[in-house]
Image (cartoon, grey):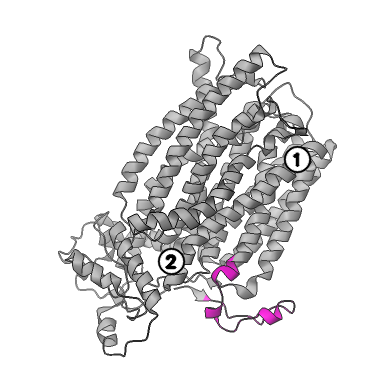
Amino acid sequence: MQGEEKPETGYKLLGRLNFKSIQQKGGFRASGFVFGLVALENMGFISNVLIMFSYFMADLSFNIPGAANTVTNFMGSTFILSIIGAFISDTFISRFQTCLIFGVVEIVAFMMMTIQAHDRGLHPEPCGGKSSCMKGGIGVMFYTSLALLALGSGGVRGALAAFGADQFDTKKPKELKAQASYFNWLVLSTTLGAAIGVVGFVWVSTNHGWWWGFFLATLGSFLGFTLFFLGKPFYRIHVPKDSPLLSIVQVIVAAVNHRKLKLPENPEELHESSTNNGLREQKLTRTSQFTWLDKAAIVPNDSKPSELSQWEICTVTQVEEVKILIRMLPIILSTVIMNTCLAQLQTFSQAQGATMNKKLGKLNFPAGSVPVIPLVFMTVLLPVYEFFFVPFARKFTKHPQGITQLQRVGVGLVLSAISMGVAGIVEVKRRNQSRINPFEPISLFWLSFQYGIFGIADMFSLVGLLEFFYKEAPVGMRSLATSFTWISMSLGYFLSSVLVDIVNSVTKRVSPSQKGWINGIMLDNNNLNLFYWLLAVLSLINFAIYLLSASLYKYKKEDDGLLKTEMASTTTSLAMISASEDELPKSTTQEDVAKDDTTAEPKVDVKDEKEHEAHSTNIKADS
């Protein structure tokens, strides 16, 4: 169980808003500061990711594949490094402190990039169309600033989403429902901030110098983290006490050491602690998957669990936590291709836009601002989804969120495949027109089709993944599990770089021109449409794999004194789960349940009880 910091007296500026008890903190009042940080930070981060491709080619002398791979490798590094922030916040310091520390690193990185972009003496000399012209001190400064930005931004992402979700107590039905809405509003804050940055920051950068984009990002991040810091008196801050990764290793070691032992016929003979220790607020019931791990909880003959170390015997709950992470792996891997598609919209689609007619009336619309289209779609559709679709779908599915998180992700995967198919068609039209009359290119807004479809796909999948990983994760691993969303993105970006190289290598050998599908600096001489269609085919294959993985996934079961391992009757199970947690004690052992049965039953809110009853029934149905 996670410890909580004692409420502080507050700052002089916010003295009147100080709260005396932890129960008065949290909720949307606290997560509002998180939303503010997310909007301000993404205002600069997303806009600069979009101008990086053009900036690398125009000022830093990269060619098309070199610029694209540098951007995708940077994004991949950013998201893979989120696991560092997640691990630190789950193991050593609070998520609040983690966000602030990595926030400082991010601000320093933006400052370095601003200086290099502003000073032309820090730009490399052209080197004849090579993939990169970076060398010497200039290269060291360039790659150091990118590395620090990836570390800072990734570390923040590894802890921030889980920190915001911590502001809701899932033991209270109202807050449980509010937490589901939190993830929608988190993504909405991201899209609102990114939309402002993509339009405003990108326009300023394109027309007044690239360094302005990095400077505005520095300013936005500084204001965002300042706002986040000022919200401390409102937060529920949890401080970790145990290492979740150490627990995973202990289970594996114990299972290997007990590999020759036979599992007992009665699962209740497996070891389970009689008290809640460390990070575990509630116990998990045993599942029948990955039974070889259950051997970690076998009590050896002539031994007492109290006399054995944590490396010699583990609890059923510890084993189930490892099983949850293993079950999540196919879900993570089957969303990688979608993020590879996302990488194309931030690289090659930018190259397409640079050759198209950018006029919007009298306004010259920057190619880098085209991604505002999916952001607008998401900004409009997220409230529609929250206020109209969810209540409507709930009437038919009886699920608190309308559809399950995995169903939501599945919709996103299908739409991403459609987006790549449309992108290939648009590229054929753009290239044909450019070859016929390069002085009359098609409108930039033809790209809105692929961007718009993918924006809707991202709305479904991103929120679904964040909520899925947070809710399914063991309590002490929620930052780590939430970072799985970013790890999937990271793998997608890295796969994009690898796929570009593989496709070019193969197509150079088999094509009559002896040139790859994507090469050089002239887009009209490439076959980008074929690359898009290849991604569409891979996306459909990936969706089929995802369907299989999602259908086999078993949702987490919590043993709060009501649930038993392997319940005999579905009817009995539903009746037991439907009992309100506010009515029954949070017991974790048979003795506690028997003892608490003799106590007076507390008064509960009828409305809350009914909401919890419906939610609990649906959890059982999902599992």
Q: Position of residue 534 (x, y in %)?
A: 46, 26
- Determine if residue 149 is in view: no
Residue drawn at (35%, 72%) of the image:
610
Q: From which residue to which does the magenta span run? A: 4-31
Is residue 12 on the magenta stretch?
Answer: yes
| Residue situated in front as seen by the camera: 310 or 452 | 452
Q: Amino acid at mark 2?
A: Val
Q: Amino acid at mark 1?
A: Trp
Residue drawn at (70%, 43%) of the image:
199
Q: Tell me: 53 left or right of 377.
A: right
Is residue 280 on the magenta stretch?
Answer: no
Q: Earlier in the sequence, mark 2 or mark 1?
A: 1
| Residue situated in front as seen by the camera: 496 or 541 | 541
In the rendered view, would you say 465 is above or below 441? below
Q: Position of residue 127 (x, y in %)?
A: 75, 24
Say which quarter of the image contains residue 266: bottom left
Q: Residues within 10 Å of mark 2 (few under 14, many from 20)?
A: some
Residue behind mark 2? 475
- Per the image, label 1 sits on a secondary structure element best described as helix
Q: Position of residue 445 (x, y in %)?
A: 64, 31
Residue drawn at (77%, 26%) of the image:
126
